[in-house]
Image (tube, grey):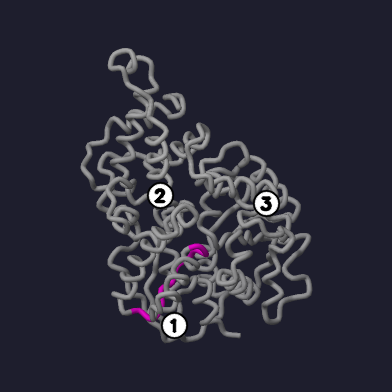
């Protein structure tokens, strides 16, 4: 690890940290664990210490020693017990790009061998199966078989105007498979010419970034772009915010891309989605990658308010201040107990609104909150925005 691993801007930003502790105040991992060592403030201090111990002038002047094996292990544990929610970045008064800094730090730790070995599962699964769960990739579109009235082609067309990029979680987890089913039904009812990629869809590559794994992303980017080109599509739509985010930031801007909430909001404004009244009080959870990451706050709310009979009540923390559900940053793999504790705080806030359901726009958020709600008998329905629209769809 050396200063070459970080940009000049990042090194300057680290030195600009005022140690105000605002990052610690909003960190979901700190709040759930009550362990201040997991805060961004502590992480920056640790990173600066490491960099100075490995930089020649600091070694010569002050005799800085490299961390011991035990110190590396402790530091690595703190770095990877993070949801990458970027709430610390949102409140930083000096504008430090903390999320990119955490991703760079994870890359360094993986490259130097100081990382949780569970991370290797991500590398192995993507290399062998092209999805993070080591499932058969030719089963990516099997959820279509569980739909009522699915067409014979199973939404696997040779050519279409729009490609629906399903994502790994929605393709394989039963609780999340309801999301692509709902979205496909709405697109059908709205007359959208779309196709799935099926087994030609590979993981978007987002888990690689979150794990700090280098060298594989380009392979997935190249493959997915070519798969879309072969369909002759002009647009790609995602119901997964992480897929959408990585296509925004790491894929060439060759196609028009949009998140499902944006796409559906546009269809509703055009009068293409037939909606009936649905008497329901809901609250909305802003996914970290869609909200703080992509700054998509308005379209999901516009869509909710466009459904007759639905009442939206906001969470105490919402929009850019929304609390993480605990499902990001590979935290569930590294520390399942901490992930559940973060989810518990999220669901407590949801219950406080008095809403009948919590709506979000992320498969992972749905999976994390649903799992906690079922295990702890929380009397609130958890659903994706596409499922809410599906409930109000005139058939």
Q: Using the image, determine if residue 267 lies above or below residue 159.
A: below
Q: Using the image, determine if residue 184 lies above or below residue 56.
A: below
Which label's residue is closer to the chain start, 2 or 3?
2
Percent x, y of residue 144: 69, 72
Residue holding disc 1: 308
Percent x, y of residue 37: 30, 45
Q: Image check: 21 left or right of 90?
A: left
Identify the residue at horizontal 57%, vertical 54% (top origin): 257
Q: Nearer the viewer, residue 227 or 85?
A: 85
Percent x, y of residue 78: 38, 44
Classify mark 3: helix, strand or loop: loop
Residue holding disc 3: 130
Identify the residue at horizontal 59%, vertical 49% (top origin): 121
Measure how far apart labels 2 and 3 are at the Cα level. Answer: 25 Å
Q: Which residues make up the magenta segment?
A: 355-364
Residue 120 in the magenta stretch? The answer is: no
Which label's residue is closer to the chain start, 2 or 1?
2
Give me the disc on residue 81: 2
Q: Image check: 196 left or right of 393?
A: right
């Amino acid at each position: 690890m050396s200063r070459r691993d970080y940009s000049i801007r990042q090194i300057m930003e680290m030195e600009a940290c005022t140690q105000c502790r605002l990052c610690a105040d909003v960190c979901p991992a700190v709040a759930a664990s009550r362990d201040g060592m997991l805060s961004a403030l502590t992480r920056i201090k640790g990173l600066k210490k490491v960099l100075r111990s490995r930089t020649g002038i600091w070694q010569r002047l002050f005799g800085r020693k490299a961390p011991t094996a035990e110190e590396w292990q402790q530091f690595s544990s703190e770095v990877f017990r993070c949801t990458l929610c970027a709430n610390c970045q949102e409140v930083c008064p000096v504008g430090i790009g903390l999320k990119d800094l955490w991703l760079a730090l994870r890359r360094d730790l993986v490259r130097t061998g100081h990382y949780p070995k569970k991370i290797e599962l991500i590398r192995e699964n993507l290399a062998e199966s092209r999805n993070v769960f080591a499932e058969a990739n030719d089963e990516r579109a099997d959820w279509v078989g569980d739909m009522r009235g699915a067409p014979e082609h199973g939404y696997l067309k040779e050519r279409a105007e729009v490609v629906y990029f399903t994502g790994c979680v929605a393709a394989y987890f039963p609780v999340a498979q309801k999301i692509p089913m709902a979205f496909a039904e709405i697109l059908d009812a709205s007359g959208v010419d779309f196709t799935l990629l099926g087994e030609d869809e590979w993981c978007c590559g987002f888990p690689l970034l979150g794990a700090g794994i280098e060298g594989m992303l380009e392979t997935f980017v190249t493959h997915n772009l070519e798969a879309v080109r072969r369909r002759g599509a002009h647009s790609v739509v995602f119901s997964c915010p992480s897929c959408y985010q990585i296509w925004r930031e790491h894929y060439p801007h060759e196609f028009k891309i949009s998140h499902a909430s944006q796409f559906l909001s546009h269809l509703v404004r055009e009068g293409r989605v037939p909606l009936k009244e649905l008497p329901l009080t809901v609250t909305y959870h802003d996914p970290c990658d869609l909200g703080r990451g992509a700054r998509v706050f308005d379209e999901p709310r516009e869509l909710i308010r466009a459904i007759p009979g639905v009442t939206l009540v906001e969470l105490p923390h919402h929009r850019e201040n929304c609390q993480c559900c605990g499902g990001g940053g590979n935290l569930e793999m590294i520390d399942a107990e901490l992930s559940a504790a973060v989810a518990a705080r999220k669901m407590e806030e949801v219950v406080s609104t008095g809403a009948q359901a919590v709506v979000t726009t992320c498969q992972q958020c749905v999976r994390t909150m649903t799992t906690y709600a079922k295990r702890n008998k929380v009397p609130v329905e958890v659903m994706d925005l596409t499922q809410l629209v599906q409930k109000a769809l005139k058939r």
